[in-house]
């Protein structure tokens, strides 16, 4: 309904200018309310979430702008505004964000090479425009290759943007409480540089540790 005439779910999509007006109004009202009612509480905003999708990408965009979402539904931001909706959202967010508050782009599967490179190109452009401060890497890393995760972090770091590990979720694969305590002790020692205990085993615990350690080492 937010994208349609009369704010009704069955109305026609509004035109681009109307949708840009609504976008700016929404961002302005949300940021202004939070910053006036709760000053200093919010230190950063995820301005745009999951706009890159190689599977439904607009081939005319250099960052693989998402044209579909959910179960094959059209992306209403793309329909009403076009791929520039991402940059315009950051433009309005920068306009209304309080001084010192950082702006982030956030996405999942950031360690997949094609998507990683597309996100890099998008954020490189936004940085050149002075519109972005960081990248959020959603960490649904069950099954993720640890070297791919590390490669993605290193690549994004080249942009000299802040990197956040967001929505951290790694399957512990039914580890016992004792095994989880072993992992915690190991990571504590590893982060301090004082390794006294053997690396947890079997492989599932080793991989679990590695993903957390990568996040820690590149903090």
Image (tube, grey):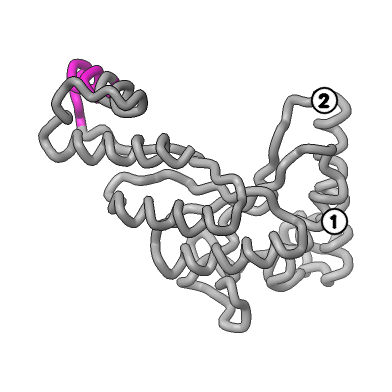
- Pointer 1 or 2: first along the chain: 1
In the picture provided, is 107 more to the left or to the right than 215? right
Q: Residue at x 48, y 37 (%)?
A: 219
Q: Which residue is mark 2?
A: 39
| Quarter of the image with the N terminus in it | bottom right
Point out the stretch of residues depicted in magenta. 174-184
Instruction: Give the prevailing secondary structure in the magenta stretch.
Output: helix
**Alpha carbon distance from label 1 to label 2:** 24 Å
Is residue 198 left or right of 69 when viewed as pictured? left
State the mark number for residue 22.
1
- Residue at 74 percent across and 25 percent down: it is 41
Residue toward you, 193 or 54: 193
Residue 11 in percent (x, y) is at: 78, 64
- Nearest to viewer (mark 1 / mark 2): 2
Give the x, y percent position of residue 106: 58, 50
- Mark identifier at residue 210: none
Q: Position of residue 181 (x, y in %)?
A: 24, 17
Q: Mark 2 packing: few (<14 Cα in 10 Å), some, or many (20+)?
A: few
Q: With respect to residue 89, does 187 lie above or below?
A: above
Element under label 1? helix
Q: Position of residue 184 (x, y in %)?
A: 29, 21
Residue 79 seen in this snapshot: no
Residue closest to the eye, 7 or 94: 94
Q: Residues within 10 Å of mark 1 (few under 14, many from 20)?
A: some
Under circle 2, the secondary element is: loop
Give the residue furthest to the bottom: 60
Identify which residue is drawn at 50% across, 48% down.
137
Furthest residue in direction front, as rendered = 193
Quarter residue 200 falls in = top left
On screen, 63 above or below 159?
Answer: below
């Amino acid at each position: 309904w937010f994208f349609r005439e009369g704010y009704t779910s069955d109305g026609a999509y509004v035109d681009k200018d109307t949708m840009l007006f609504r976008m700016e109004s929404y961002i302005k009202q949300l940021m202004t309310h939070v910053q006036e009612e709760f000053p200093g509480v919010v230190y950063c905003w995820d301005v745009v979430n999951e706009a890159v999708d190689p599977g439904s990408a607009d081939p005319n965009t250099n960052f693989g702008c998402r044209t579909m979402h959910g179960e094959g539904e059209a992306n209403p931001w793309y329909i009403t505004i076009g791929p520039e909706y991402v940059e315009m959202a950051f433009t309005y967010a920068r306009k209304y964000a309080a001084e010192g508050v950082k702006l982030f782009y956030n996405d999942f599967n950031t360690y997949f090479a094609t998507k990683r490179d597309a996100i890099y190109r998008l954020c490189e452009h936004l940085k050149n425009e002075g519109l972005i401060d960081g990248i959020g890497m959603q960490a649904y890393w069950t099954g993720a290759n640890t070297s791919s995760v590390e490669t993605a972090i290193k690549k994004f770091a080249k942009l000299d943007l802040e990197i956040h590990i967001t929505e951290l979720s790694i399957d512990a694969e039914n580890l016992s409480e004792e095994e989880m305590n072993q992992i915690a002790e190991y990571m504590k020692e590893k982060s301090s540089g004082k390794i006294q205990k053997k690396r947890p085993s079997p492989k599932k615990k080793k991989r679990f540790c590695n993903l957390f350690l990568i996040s820690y080492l590149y903090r």
